[in-house]
Image: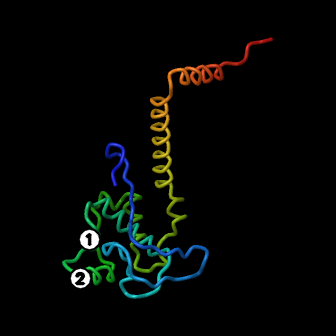
């Protein structure tokens, strides 16, 4: 989904999910967007949260190249390509970036070799991008608030801000 004058992208999936948090449970159902299915799902094996990490890798690959990493003219061909784990290499200028290197980790055939969500979030390039988005969002919220405030309320808040920047007068 594109929002705010095509500057913010929100990723959503209206498929079915299974919550296995707080358990050691492994799911064994086959649902989801076929292009983003993990090898463990297409091979009929049990899976856990690392299957979502694979899907994130597929989405990130597609954002970087504007095409999905695994395609096929039919579901059988698609499944074979996913199971093999072979996808077209990222362009060299993308492959050398932190984001491009992350794709390789996310699309590891072995689920245990894929990073956890928390380790992805701890990467400096991810933290920096999230911080920039949060600052931008905060600035947009303040601008929107200023437009919707009543003139009197705005003046009162403005005076309070100005007052708080100066030290109190001596007694």
Residue 141 image position (x, y, % from top left): 48, 38
Q: Nearer the viewer, residue 102 or 81?
A: 81
Give the quarter of the figure containing the N terminus: bottom left
Question: Local crowd at mark 2 within 10 Å, few (<14), some, or many (≥20)?
Answer: few
In the image, residue 95 above or below residue 84:
above
Kindly identify the residue that appears in the image at 48 percent across and 49 percent down: 128
Question: Local crowd at mark 1 within 10 Å, few (<14), some, or many (≥20)?
Answer: few
Residue 99 image position (x, y, % from top left): 39, 59
Residue 116 image position (x, y, % from top left): 52, 69
Among all residues in the image, which is located at the extreme left?
A: 73
In the image, residue 82 above or below residue 102:
below
Residue 67 image position (x, y, % from top left): 25, 64
Among all residues in the image, which is located at the extreme right?
A: 171
Residue annotated with mark 2: 77
Q: Is residue 71 left or right of residue 146?
A: left
Residue annotated with mark 1: 88
**Secondary structure at numbered mark 2:** helix
Q: Give residue 78's quadrant in the image.
A: bottom left
Q: Nearer the viewer, residue 165 or 19?
A: 19
């Amino acid at each position: 989904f594109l929002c705010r004058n095509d500057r913010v992208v929100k990723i959503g999936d209206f498929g079915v999910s299974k919550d296995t948090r707080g358990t050691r449970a492994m799911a064994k159902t086959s649902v989801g967007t076929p292009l983003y299915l993990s090898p463990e799902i297409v091979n009929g094996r049990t899976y856990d949260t690392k299957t979502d990490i694979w899907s994130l890798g597929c989405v990130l690959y597609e954002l970087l190249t504007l095409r999905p990493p695994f395609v096929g003219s039919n579901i059988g061909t698609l499944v074979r390509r996913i199971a093999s784990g072979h996808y077209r290499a990222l362009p060299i200028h993308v492959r050398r970036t932190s984001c491009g290197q992350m794709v390789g980790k996310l699309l590891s055939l072995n689920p245990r070799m894929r990073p956890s969500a928390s380790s992805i979030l701890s990467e400096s390039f991810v933290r920096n991008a999230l911080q920039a988005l949060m600052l931008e969002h905060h600035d947009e919220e303040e601008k929107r608030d200023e437009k919707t405030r009543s003139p009197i309320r705005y003046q009162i808040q403005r005076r309070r801000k100005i007052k708080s920047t100066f030290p109190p007068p001596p007694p």
